[in-house]
C-alpha cells in the first residue's frame, strides 16, 4: 500500500459527522496552496480555540501586526462559547466544523490547538489542501500518526512547525554548538524533568455549568465532533464534562504527562544533541499516587493517566535519557547532558520553559587532570565554563519563525522530523506504562514491539 493510500485510509476511517461536506483529504490530488507575494498578508485560521488556542492565536495576531504581515481570518471550535469569544476578538468569522475552514481558499495556514487525538487528522487534511500548519504539541497521539505526518510534509512540501515554543530558546542551540565542538566528549546520559503542584497544573480546569451537547446558544458543545475517532461516550454517563474540559486526564484524547509536559523536554534535547534521534528502547513507570478522586465528586475517579511518571530511553548511538515528573510535587531536577569528558547544564533550575542566562560546562576531573585529555585545549585549565544565552520571548520567536518559513519555504525550528523523533519516545512511553512492558523501536520500518528487534 502506498504512503498516499495509508494517509487517505486513516483520514477516511476517522472521519465523523455526516454533513454535506466531503471527507476532507480523501482526494489523492495535492493542493499546492496559494502563492504568497512579498506584500501579501498570510491568512491564518485557528482550529481549536480553547485556552491554548486562544492564547496562541493572540500571539499570532501580535506578531502578525508587528513583524510579519499576517492576520487571523477564521476560527473554529466545537464549543459555541469559545467560538463566539474568539470571533469577536479577532473580528472574523468561523465555524463549529473544521472542514469548512480547510475548504476556504483564502486560508494559507492553520493553527491546530485541539485535543491531541485530533492533531494528526486535521494537520494531514490541511496539508493535502495546501495549508501550512502550526501544530500544537504534542505533534500527535500515536507513533503511526507521527509517521504519516512526516511522510505528508515530504510529499506536499508544506511547512509544519510543532508548537513547543521552548525549542526557540537560545540555550538549546548554544548547547548544540558546544556538543558539536566536542566540549563534553562522548555523550552518555541526558536528564530532565517537568514538575507541578497546583490545581490548574493537575489539569482540573474550570467546568462551565450548563455547557454540553444539550446546551442552548453559547452553551452548545458538538460532542460527536469532539469525540471524533475516539471511543463513543455518553455525556452524562461517562462524565463528559470532565472529559471535555479536562481532556488531558484521559487516554482517549491525551497521553497525560508524557504528551503535555515531556514534549517540552524531549524536543529541546533532540535539538541539543545536534542530530534528532529515534529511541531504540523505552521504559516507563509511575502511577496515580495523589489524585485518585475528583475534588468536586469523590465518587468518581480523578483521572486515568498517572499523576507521577518517569521515563528511560536508550538510543542507538550509545546514550540514554531519563525524565521525571509529578503533578503533586513542584521540585525540578537540573536539565543537563552528561558526557564522559564534561557535563553540559542547560537549565540549572530544571524548568525547561524557564529562562536561562547561561549554559554551564563542567569538566570531569581526576587528580586535577581532565579525564579526557583532549579537553585540555578546550577548557584551558578551567574546570567550568559559562556560555551566555540570549534572552528571547520564545513564543513570539517561534511564531515569527513559522511565519517567516511560510514565505521562505525553509524548515522551521521544530520541524516535523525533529518532532517525530521526540514523539516516538513519548508515545512509546505511554505504551510502556499502559502495558507494563519495555517497548522497542525499529526506525527503518517504524515498527515497535515489546520484544527486541533483530539487528
Image (cartoon, helix red, strand yellow):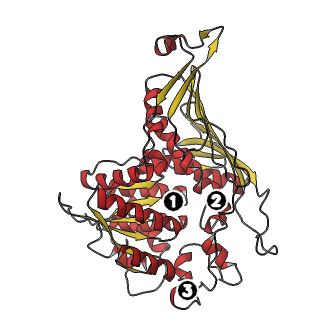
Q: Residues within 10 Å of mark 2 (few under 14, many from 20)?
A: many
**Marks 3 and 1, how far apart at CA:** 28 Å
Q: Where is mark 2, residue-wise?
A: 256
Labelled disc at residue 140: 1
Q: Considering depth in this image, is 337 or 454 the residue closer to the camera?
A: 337
Q: Nearer the viewer, mark 2 or mark 3?
A: 3
Q: Where is mark 3, residue-wise?
A: 219
> Vertically, is 182 above or below 151?
above
Q: Nearer the viewer, mark 1 or mark 2?
A: 2
Q: Considering depth in this image, is 27 or 168 the residue closer to the camera?
A: 168
Q: At x 60% / y 35%, what residue is drawn? A: 348
> Vertically, is 96 above or below 253?
below
**Marks 2 and 3, how far apart at CA:** 27 Å
**Marks 1 and 2, how far apart at CA:** 13 Å
In this orientation, does residue 213 appear? Answer: yes
Q: Nearer the viewer, mark 3 or mark 1?
A: 3
Secondary structure of the residue carrying tag 1 is loop
Q: Earlier in the sequence, mark 2 or mark 3?
A: 3
Q: Considering depth in this image, is 184 or 276 the residue closer to the camera?
A: 184
Quarter of the rendering containing residue 319: top right
Residue 299 coordinates in the image, percent (x, y): 82, 75
Secondary structure of the residue carrying tag 3 is helix
Amino acid at each position: 500500500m502506498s504512503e498516499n493510500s495509508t494517509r487517505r485510509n486513516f483520514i477516511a476511517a476517522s472521519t465523523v459527522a455526516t454533513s454535506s461536506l466531503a471527507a476532507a483529504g480523501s482526494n489523492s490530488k495535492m493542493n499546492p496552496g496559494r502563492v504568497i507575494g512579498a506584500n501579501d498578508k498570510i491568512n491564518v485560521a485557528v482550529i481549536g480555540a480553547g485556552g491554548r488556542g486562544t492564547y496562541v492565536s493572540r500571539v499570532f495576531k501580535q506578531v502578525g501586526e508587528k513583524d510579519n504581515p499576517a492576520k487571523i481570518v477564521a476560527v473554529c471550535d466545537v464549543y459555541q462559547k469559545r467560538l463566539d469569544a474568539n470571533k469577536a476578538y479577532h473580528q472574523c468569522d468561523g465555524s463549529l466544523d473544521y472542514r469548512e475552514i480547510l475548504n476556504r481558499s483564502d486560508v494559507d495556514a492553520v493553527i491546530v490547538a485541539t485535543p491531541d487525538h485530533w492533531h494528526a487528522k486535521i494537520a494531514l487534511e490541511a496539508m493535502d489542501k495546501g495549508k501550512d500548519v502550526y501544530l500544537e504539541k504534542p505533534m500527535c497521539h500515536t507513533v503511526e500518526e507521527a509517521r504519516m505526518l512526516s511522510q505528508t510534509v515530504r510529499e506536499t512540501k508544506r511547512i509544519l512547525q510543532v508548537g513547543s515554543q521552548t525549542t526557540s530558546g537560545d540555550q538549546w542551540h548554544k548547547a548544540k554548538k558546544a556538543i558539536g565542538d566536542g566540549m563534553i566528549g562522548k555523550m552518555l546520559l541526558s536528564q530532565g524533568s517537568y514538575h507541578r503542584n497546583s490545581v490548574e497544573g493537575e489539569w482540573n480546569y474550570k467546568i462551565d455549568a450548563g455547557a454540553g451537547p444539550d446546551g442552548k446558544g453559547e452553551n452548545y458543545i458538538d460532542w460527536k465532533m469532539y469525540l471524533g475517532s475516539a471511543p463513543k461516550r455518553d455525556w452524562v454517563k461517562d462524565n463528559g464534562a470532565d472529559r471535555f474540559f479536562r481532556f488531558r486526564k484521559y487516554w482517549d484524547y491525551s497521553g497525560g504527562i508524557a504528551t503535555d509536559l515531556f514534549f517540552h523536554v524531549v524536543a529541546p534535547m533532540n535539538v541539543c544533541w545536534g542530530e534528532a534521534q529515534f529511541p531504540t528502547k523505552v521504559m516507563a513507570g509511575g502511577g496515580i499516587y495523589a489524585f485518585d478522586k475528583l475534588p468536586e465528586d469523590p465518587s468518581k475517579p480523578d483521572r486515568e493517566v498517572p499523576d507521577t511518571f518517569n521515563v528511560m530511553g536508550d538510543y542507538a548511538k550509545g546514550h540514554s535519557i531519563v525524565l521525571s515528573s509529578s503533578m503533586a510535587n513542584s521540585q525540578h531536577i537540573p536539565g543537563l547532558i552528561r558526557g564522559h569528558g564534561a557535563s553540559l547544564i542547560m537549565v540549572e533550575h530544571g524548568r525547561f520553559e524557564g529562562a536561562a542566562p547561561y549554559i554551564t560546562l563542567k569538566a570531569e576531573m581526576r587528580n586535577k587532570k581532565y579525564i579526557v585529555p583532549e579537553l585540555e585545549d578546550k577548557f584551558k585549565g578551567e574546570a567550568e565554563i559559562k556560555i551566555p544565552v540570549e534572552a528571547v520571548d520564545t513564543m513570539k520567536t517561534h511564531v515569527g519563525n513559522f511565519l517567516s518559513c511560510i514565505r521562505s519555504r525553509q524548515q522551521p525550528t521544530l520541524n516535523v522530523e525533529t518532532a517525530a523523533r521526540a514523539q516516538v519516545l513519548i508515545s512509546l512511553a505511554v505504551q510502556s506504562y499502559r502495558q507494563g512492558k519495555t517497548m522497542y523501536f525499529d526506525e527503518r520500518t517504524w515498527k515497535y514491539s515489546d520484544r527486541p528487534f533483530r539487528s
